[in-house]
């Protein structure tokens, strides 16, 4: 009998976990037919998106070649950018790396094309931490500034060159500022500059950090960052990046050599032309078992899908942690659907356990969990270990 083709579009954190979950759950067979798995991604490897700030502070490689993953050995990989899905003819149209347009037929499909990092309008200036190229541009910029500072005689100008503003106080802004201050200080020492003149300003538009958790957790995080040398500013937004300073919403100017934007994620704009049903915010509409409305055999999870817990009406956030739980459930859903059994339905991660971990630089982590109204924190080395484990698990490296 013919094989059944299961296509995964997007090998990010959630696509990788989905592929593995469906493979494991189905054992590669459905209705006595072998399942042929195909992964389509526009990139040559899995991007460890949660670590996007690493190449902005140092030299770390965050792209893992697909060959690294043994469970992908018998999976066909197509490097290409999916343009559209024809759910009536069950075909996916994509453009390969040579710019040729092709199509492939599917029986089952998971759309996990994720999100992109939000960018300010270009007239605002600065560099948004959007992808690896932007990360490298950030690294080159602050390093060039420090080299210039090392030969600068004017003390005010020297301090400006040793200062960076980070606009956006979410987790990615927090992690970027904490790691950047460490790296900039190391580099300053090696250039015979005074490391304590390094200033990393984290600008949060809110009156505290970490709005997803209780107030005291936000304050604790702010305290730790200050202890570690980050200047945290609350209720401050960058309005404009000028040549020598950033202009803030209260009229102040902060003299800096570089402004980095970390202002969150938006659903992948490529979804707008893919031909799948979208919410007004641009995420794919799915039912409580991740089935895309009106497209038989198509499922969608991760940052690109709007996933609501039917019990409490809560929508999942664009977080790898939540996407990975969806992926594990998706394996069971797909197999149940193939066998005509009732499928599991979505349950929000926070109804099981609130859990966040944040890296604050090597050996300095912060973990917060809440269950039955009880808050639990872990900081320091153990927090860092848990944080590193979560990064690795997210990319299936452990
Ligand atoms: C700096 C930063 C820090 C973060 N920190 C955390 C954190 O601490 N905890 C947490 O839970 N989450 C965090 N997140 C969010 C997390 O990264 C996302 O929730 C997660 O990456 C979502 O995974 P995904 O697979 O749905 O999408 P993505 O990771 O965006 O992957 C999408 C994949 O689809 C591919 N793709 C896109 N369009 C196409 C197309 N048209 N054709 C073919 N392939 C395509 C991409 O190449 C990519 O491989 C962070 C994000 C950033 C940017």
Image (spheres, helix red, strand yellow):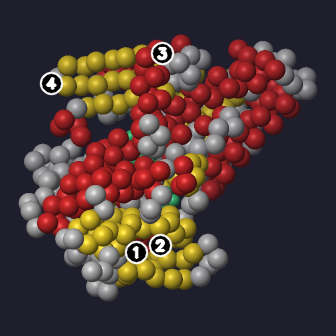
Q: Mark 1 points at which residue?
A: 274
**Earlier along the polypeptide chain: callout 4 or callout 3?**
4
Q: Distance between the residues labelled 3 and 2?
A: 42 Å
Residue drawn at (59%, 27%), measured in percent from left and top? 179
- Residue 380 to residue 360: above or below: above
Q: Which of marks 4 and 3 is in front?
A: 3
State the separation of the CA atoms marked 1 and 3: 45 Å
Give 269 or 346, whichever is nearer the viewer.
Answer: 346
Residue 236 drawn above or below residue 334: above
SS at circle 3: helix
Q: Name the disc covering residue 82, or none.
A: 2
Q: Mark 4 points at which residue?
A: 372
Q: Which of marks 4 and 2 is nearer the N terminus?
A: 2
The quadrant the C terminus occupies is top left
**Image quarter of residue 332:** bottom left
Q: Which residue is drawn at 62% across and 56% down?
A: 122
**Circle on res. 381:** 3
Q: Which residue is drawn at 86% across and 32% down?
A: 148
Mark 1, other Cα within 10 Å: few <14 / some 14–19 / many ≥20: some
Distance (Cα) linking label 1 and label 2: 8 Å
Q: Is mark 2 on a helix, strand or loop?
A: strand
Q: Is mark 2 within 8 Å of ligand 1?
A: yes
The x, y position of residue 127, in whole percent, is 64, 47
At mark 4, the secondary structure is: loop
């Amino acid at each position: 009998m013919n094989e059944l083709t299961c296509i995964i579009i997007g090998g990010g954190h959630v696509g990788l976990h989905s592929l593995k979950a469906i493979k494991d759950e189905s054992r590669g067979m459905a209705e006595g037919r072998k399942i042929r798995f195909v992964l389509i991604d526009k990139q040559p490897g899995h991007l460890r998106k949660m670590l996007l700030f690493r190449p902005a502070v140092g030299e770390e490689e965050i792209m893992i070649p697909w060959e690294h993953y043994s469970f992908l050995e018998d999976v066909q990989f197509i490097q290409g950018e999916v343009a559209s899905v024809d759910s009536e003819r069950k075909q996916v149209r994509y453009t390969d790396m040579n710019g040729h347009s092709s199509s492939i037929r599917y029986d089952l499909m998971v759309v996990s094309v994720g999100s992109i990092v939000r960018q300010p309008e270009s007239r605002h200036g600065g560099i948004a931490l959007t992808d690896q190229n932007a990360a490298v541009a950030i690294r080159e910029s602050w390093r060039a500034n420090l080299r210039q500072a090392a030969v600068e005689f004017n003390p005010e100008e020297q301090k400006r060159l040793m200062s960076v503003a980070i606009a956006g106080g979410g987790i990615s802004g927090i992690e970027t500022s904490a790691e950047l201050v460490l790296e900039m200080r190391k580099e300053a020492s090696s250039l015979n500059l005074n490391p304590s003149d390094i200033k990393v300003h984290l600008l949060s538009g809110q009156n505290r950090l970490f709005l997803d958790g209780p107030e005291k957790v936000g304050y604790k995080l702010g305290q730790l960052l200050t202890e570690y040398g980050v200047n945290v500013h609350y209720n401050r937004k960058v309005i404009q990046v000028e040549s020598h300073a950033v202009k803030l919403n209260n009229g102040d100017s902060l003299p800096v050599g570089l402004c980095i934007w970390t202002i969150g994620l938006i659903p992948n704009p490529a979804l707008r032309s893919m031909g799948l049903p979208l919410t007004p915010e641009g995420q794919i509409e799915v039912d409580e078992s991740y089935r895309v409305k009106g497209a038989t055999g198509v499922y969608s999870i991760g940052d690109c899908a709007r996933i609501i817990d039917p019990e409490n009406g809560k929508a999942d956030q664009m977080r790898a942690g939540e996407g990975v739980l969806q992926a594990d459930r998706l394996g069971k859903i797909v197999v149940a659907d193939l066998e005509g059994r009732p499928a599991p339905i979505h349950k929000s991660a926070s109804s099981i356990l609130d859990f966040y971990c944040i890296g604050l630089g090597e050996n300095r982590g912060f973990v917060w969990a809440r269950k039955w109204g009880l808050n639990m924190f872990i900081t320091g080395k153990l927090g860092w270990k848990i944080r590193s484990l979560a990064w690795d698990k997210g990319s299936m490296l452990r």
